[in-house]
Amino acid sequence: MARKKILVTGGAGFVGSHLCERLLNDGNEVYCLDNYFTGQKENVVHLLKNPYFELIRHDVTSSIFLETDEIYNLACPASPVHYQYNPIKTMKTSVMGAINMLGLAKRVNAKILQASTSEVYGDPLVHPQPESYWGHVNPIGERACYDEGKRSAETLFLNYHKQNNVNIKIIRIFNTYGPKMHPNDGRVVSNFIVQALQNQDITVYGEGNQTRSFQYVDDLVEGMIRLMNSRDGFIGPVNIGNPGEFTILELAKKVIELTGSKSKIVYKPLPSDDPMQRQPDISLAKKELDWEPKVNLEEGLLKTIAFFKTVI
Ligand code: NAD
Ligand code: UDP
């Protein structure tokens, strides 16, 4: 069978680099496109010895012309610290990036998957969140550049599908962690592990009673590939996340326990619009993709801690 040519935008980032590696191992030809805003060459440099891997420095806010069979559109900073650094650029990346990649998919007749997010549900009033929930997003808040950018991208995907018959898939990703997160990424799992390994204070925002459901990166990559290969006519959106729900304080205590750290927990102000609870309803993923997460929090944290010990 001929190798599929697969473009991964944001391929040098945390999730993208795991996805590139898996797609190469599955025997595909992979084009990894990135502007290195939050990603880094180090994440994929080991793949360069594979002749079926290509690294392209490019910004998705500009169009690009290449031949490809499938596109995974991941380009977009995902940590609140990074996406709020230049909110206009974040929206441009989501919206213009979607338009450019959908235009490419239309031109070369490629199938295209959008990495959307549980953030489309905002600070949810329905719990757990099924795909049918429309969400509760503040359009003028600190997180809006990301949330509304991703919501607009979903709309663009749907419209290119209906109007131009582009073959689309939309995944709504819940909080994901694992090796290759940047030590300064700013998200909670990497912050807590780095702090714990350095015996520094663990910074819990607010009282730590807000919840998140944490998914190990290998489970996400499996879900993405299953969605891309799902039956014609199934486009999603589909939640991919681990339904195990933990408070941020529980996470802090778990990280201290697993690292054997001497760190103390300190409390910092809760950022505005920080969602109070989040848990995926994964019934649709189970039914359509026969997918469910395999790695529990403790197992995933131990693998992630082992990684951070090698880089800090
Ligand atoms: P990340 O920040 O590690 O990776 C994003 C990558 O996109 C980086 O390599 C960055 O340099 C690149 N990028 C950013 N703007 C770009 C642009 N304009 N042009 C080209 N490349 C650009 O984040 P991640 O956790 O790997 O997230 C990957 C995708 O998954 C993102 O779209 C994110 O919104 C989505 N997602 C992730 C999570 C999660 O918990 N990790 C949750 C929901 C959604
Ligand atoms: N958080 C925290 N300490 C940190 C970083 C984050 O308590 O050092 C909290 C944050 O306020 C939020 C949760 O952890 O309630 C998850 O934050 P993250 O930035 O990882 O993702 P998101 O808010 O986008 O789910």
Image (tube, grey):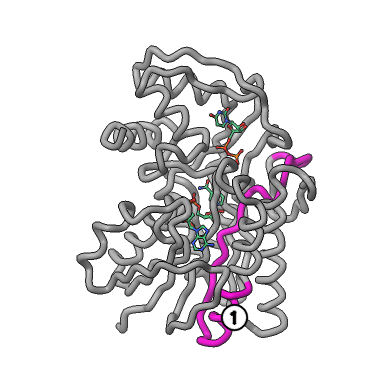
Q: Which residue is at 50% across, 22% downward? A: 252
Q: Position of residue 294 (x, y in %)?
A: 42, 44
Q: Which quadrant would residue 254 be assigned to in this image?
A: top left
Q: Which residue is mark 1?
A: 103
Residue reaching furthest to the left: 49
Name the side, left or right, on which 308 lies relative to 126.
Answer: left
In the rendered image, the vertical position of residue 286 relative to residue 168, given as above or below: above
Question: In this view of the protein, which residue sits in the foreground, 46 or 63?
Answer: 63
Could you classify mark 1 by the number of other residues whose Cα lies within 10 Å: few (under 14), some (14-19), or many (20 or more)?
A: some
Q: Is residue 59 left or right of residue 298?
A: right
Q: Residue at x 33, y 53 (%)?
A: 43
Q: Amino acid at mark 1?
A: Gly
Task: Name the residue rendered at 35%, 65% in the picture.
Answer: 23
Please state which of residues 250 and 138 is positioned toward the viewer in this rendering: 138
Q: Quadrant of the N terminus?
A: bottom left
Q: Is residue 221 above or below residue 6?
A: above
Q: Position of residue 300 (x, y in %)?
A: 39, 37
Q: In the visual, does 187 lie left or right of 218?
A: right
User: Quarter-wise, where is residue 197 in the image?
Assistant: top left
In screen coordinates, is 6 left or right of 45? right
Image quadrant where one finds the C terminus: top left
Is 159 within the magenta? no
Residue occupying image coordinates x 47% and y 54%: 37
Does residue 299 lie above or below 257 as drawn?
below
The percent coordinates of residue 125 (x first, y second) are: 78, 40
Name above or below for residue 95 compared with residue 101.
Answer: above
Any atom of ligand 1 within 8 Å of the CB at mark 1? no
| Helix, strand or loop under label 1 | helix
The range drawn in magenta is 99-127
* Residue 182 picture location, percent across and down: 41, 42
Q: Residue 113 colored magenta?
A: yes
